Amino acid sequence: TINYNTIYTTVTIEVTKKEITGITFSGYTVPYDKSVHTIEISGTLPTGVTVEYYLGEEEFEGAINVGVYEITAKFTDSTGNYQVPGDMNATLTITKIDPEYTVPTGLTGIYGDTLSTITLDDGWTFDDPSTVMEPAGDFVANVTFTPEDTINYNTIYTTVTIEVTKK
């Protein structure tokens, strides 16, 4: 019979942090709609790993108004077991939209007078109010509608038809 002695020894095992994969952070563009828009990572983070979003140095919780928002995703690991991704950047863009508006109709003027003699609805102006209306008949003039909120809405450029009567 052969006898064996039990030998005990110590070994060192280096355990490395597990890499987190499958995480992306992509931007998008959306038209202004009075809603709060956010931007978030896609993918699943392991338990103990969190992400926070920043716009510059401030925490980012969403945007409503038109603009280009450069967002940074920053990761932390409270367990110490994961190799977190470096900061990721993405852009959220909110674009202007056309406001609701009604082009003025039923406008009348007198031959030889300037457009400045005609009163337009609030927000509307003639592009060149010193233009003389001639000849009598239908006269087309360029007009601009400027919304109260010029941050989120486009300015509208169009034309109106004025019925010019004889003097």
Image (cartoon, rainbow, N blue to C red):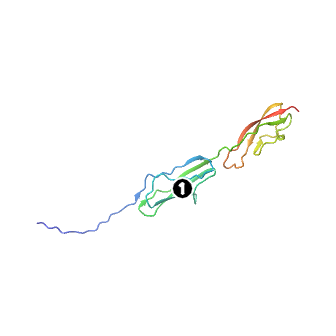
Residue 71, horizontal then vertical, whole percent: 56, 54
Residue to which mark 1 is pinned: 72
Q: Quadrant of residue 101?
A: top right
- Residue at 83% x, 36% y is 109
Task: Please name whichever residue, 3 or 31, is drawn nearer the observer in this view of the structure.
Answer: 31
Residue reaching furthest front?
106
- Residue at 54% x, 49% y is 27
Res. 132 visible in picture: no
Residue reaching furthest right?
167
Q: Secondary structure at mark 1?
A: strand
Res. 92 visible in picture: yes
Classify 124 as above or below 38: above
Task: Please name whichever residue, 38 or 80, is drawn nearer the observer in this view of the structure.
Answer: 38
What crowding class fits label 1: few (fewer than 14 Cα within 10 Å), some (14-19), or many (20 or more)? many
Residue 164, horizontal then vertical, whole percent: 83, 33
Residue 118, horizontal then vertical, whole percent: 82, 40
Residue 11, horizontal then vertical, whole percent: 29, 66
Q: If the image is split into quadrants, where does the N terminus sit?
A: bottom left
Identify residue type, mark 1.
Thr
Q: Quadrant of residue 116?
A: top right
Task: Please name whichever residue, 128 or 147, is drawn nearer the observer in this view of the structure.
Answer: 147
- Residue at 45% x, 54% y is 44
71 on left or right of 98: left
80 on left or right of 113: left
Classify 163 as above or below 95: above
Q: Quadrant of residue 99?
A: top right
